[in-house]
Amino acid sequence: MNQEPGLICTTNAYADAMSGAVLLDVRKKDEVQALAFDVPEWIHLPFSELTQRWRELPTDRDVLVVCQNGTQSAEAALYLQRMGLSRVKPVRGGLLLWMQKGYPVKGQRMDTAPLSHPSSASPYPTGKT
């Protein structure tokens, strides 16, 4: 394949999501139920359903595609751009990097996406190793 379409860093994705962009989460249903992005406009459309339901997505504003670690979001964004959605961008690093940056989520951080030290008592990164 060519290159990732308009890859956006997590910091810019958060800023854009807070000012009108839609976050498209392509993770599995159980992953989203355990831990979700906490932003004003969010759509859950599992990667496995993308080819059947992509027409449900807005075309009048930016759509930032997110997943667990950034891999599926890049594939999903490329597919959506091929379908004619020009305002689609994959977010680098997915939910894992989002949490490492300290951006808001809903749910139990350690249940779905452990960071560096899964045995740590605190669900938040402390910077200690």
Image (tube, helix red, strand yellow):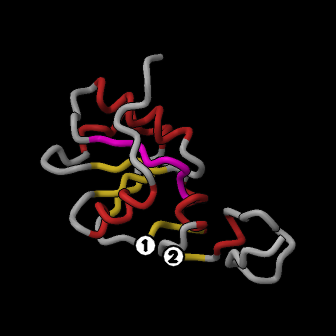
Q: Which label was assigned to residue 69?
A: none
Q: Residues within 10 Å of mark 2 (few under 14, many from 20)?
A: few
The x and y percentages for residue 65 are 40, 47
Could you say which quadrant of the image residue 52 lies in?
top left
Residue closest to the far front = 128
Please state the horizontal and vertical placement of residue 6, each as a whole percent of the image: 34, 37
Mark 1 — residue?
Answer: 38
Asked whether the residues under the numbered discs 1 and 2 touch, taking CB atoms below 8 Å apart as contact, a structural biologist would say: yes
Question: Is 41 above or below relative to 9?
Answer: below
Q: Which residues are magenta?
A: 88-95
In the rendered image, residue 94 lying in the magenta stretch gets the answer yes
Callout 1 amino acid: Asp
Q: Is residue 99 above or below residue 28?
A: below
Q: Please check the rendered image and state whether residue 7 is part of the magenta-colored stretch, yes or no.
A: no
Q: Position of residue 55 (x, y in %)?
A: 24, 38
x and y, in percent, of residue 47 in the image: 48, 40
Point out the image quarter for the C terminus: bottom right
Residue 31 vs residue 82: left or right?
right
Residue 79 vs residue 10, the one in the foreground? 10
Local SS, label 2: strand
Q: Residue 46 versus residue 105: which sits nearer the camera?
A: 105
Q: Is residue 69 left or right of residue 12?
A: right
Mark 1 is surrounded, within 10 Å at the Cα level, by few (under 14), some (14 to 19) or many (20 or more) other residues, namely some
- Assign a secondary structure to mark 1: loop
Q: Is residue 100 left or right of residue 53?
A: right
Residue depicted at 71% across the width and 71% down the height = 110
Identify the residue shown where x is 29% and y is 49%: 63
Residue type highlighted by circle 2: Lys
User: Where is mark 2, residue-wise?
Assistant: 106
Residue drawn at (25%, 58%) of the image:
21
